[in-house]
């Protein structure tokens, strides 16, 4: 099973993430989002950040989680590579994200993501895995 696939959305960008459980799903959604910004192979894990996100539901938590990662990219230029989830409940996620400061010469230019949105957002349990669709405002 793929970790994620990109969704072609007119005027925006999207990711369909897959996972064996919700933790795996949230990791793969973040990996898919980062792949829209830059080639993940160009990122070196040099420093770590502790990230906490909260939401009213699993869907709200996914949007909050991705928007927290976008905030750290926009405000501090931090791009993640490796993620370790320490705690995940329906409404709370705590994780360590390891990556580095974004360097446009080394990382190239991908999409400038403004936010993860609730547009067409879904998390579904399939027979043997989870799937989530997330659309990003660019």
Image (cartoon, helix red, strand yellow):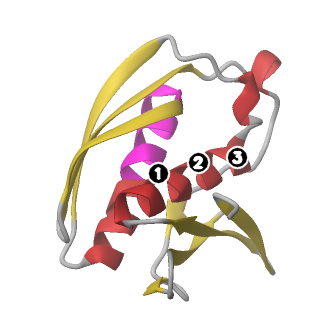
Task: Kindly identify which numbered label has been placed on residue 81.
Answer: none
Contact between labelled residues 2 and 3, with CB atoms less than 8 Å apart = yes
Q: Residue 126, percent across and down? A: 50, 87
For marks 1 and 3, give the CA distance: 12 Å
Query: Which residue is labeled 1 in the image?
Result: 27
In which quadrant of the rendered view does residue 75 lie? top left
Q: Residue 60, percent across and down? A: 30, 74
Side (left or right) of 128 relative to 41: left
In which quadrant of the rendered view does residue 28 lie? bottom right
Query: Which residue is labeled 2 in the image?
Result: 31
- In reply to whether residue 71 is colored magenta, the answer given is yes
**Range drawn in magenta:** 67-80
Q: Earlier in the sequence, mark 1 or mark 3?
A: 1
For marks 1 and 2, give the CA distance: 6 Å
Query: Which residue is labeled 3 in the image?
Result: 35
Characterize the local packing of mark 2: few (<14), some (14-19) or many (20 or more) Cα atoms within 10 angstroms. Answer: many
Q: Quadrant of the C terminus?
A: bottom right
Who's the residue at 62% across and 45% down the image?
34
Contact between labelled residues 2 and 1, with CB atoms less than 8 Å apart = yes
Side (left or right) of 42 relative to 126: right
Who's the residue at 50% across and 27% down the image?
78
Q: Looking at the picture, does residue 101 appear above or below residue 82? A: above
Who's the residue at 43% across and 36% down the image?
83
Q: Nearer the viewer, mark 1 or mark 3?
A: 1
Residue sitting nearer the eye, 96 or 121 = 96
Q: Looking at the picture, does residue 93 appear above or below residue 71? A: below
Q: Residue 7, percent across and down? A: 75, 74
Residue sitting nearer the eye, 10 or 125 = 125
Secondary structure found at label 2: helix
Count of numbered badges drawn on the protein = 3
Characterize the local packing of mark 3: few (<14), some (14-19) or many (20 or more) Cα atoms within 10 angstroms. Answer: some
- In reply to whether residue 42 is colored magenta, the answer given is no
């Amino acid at each position: 099973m793929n970790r994620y696939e990109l969704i072609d959305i007119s005027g925006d960008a999207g990711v369909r993430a897959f996972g064996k459980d919700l933790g795996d799903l949230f990791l793969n959604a973040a990996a898919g989002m980062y792949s829209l910004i830059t080639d993940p192979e160009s990122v070196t894990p040099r420093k770590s950040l502790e990230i906490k996100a909260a939401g009213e539901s699993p869907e709200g938590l996914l949007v909050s989680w991705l928007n927290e990662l976008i905030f750290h990219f926009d405000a501090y230029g931090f791009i993640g590579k490796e993620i370790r989830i320490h705690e995940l409940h329906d409404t709370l996620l705590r994780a360590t994200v390891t990556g580095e400061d974004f360097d446009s010469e080394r990382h190239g230019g991908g999409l400038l993501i403004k936010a993860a949105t609730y547009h067409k957002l879904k998390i579904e349990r399939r027979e043997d895995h989870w799937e989530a669709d997330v659309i990003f405002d660019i």
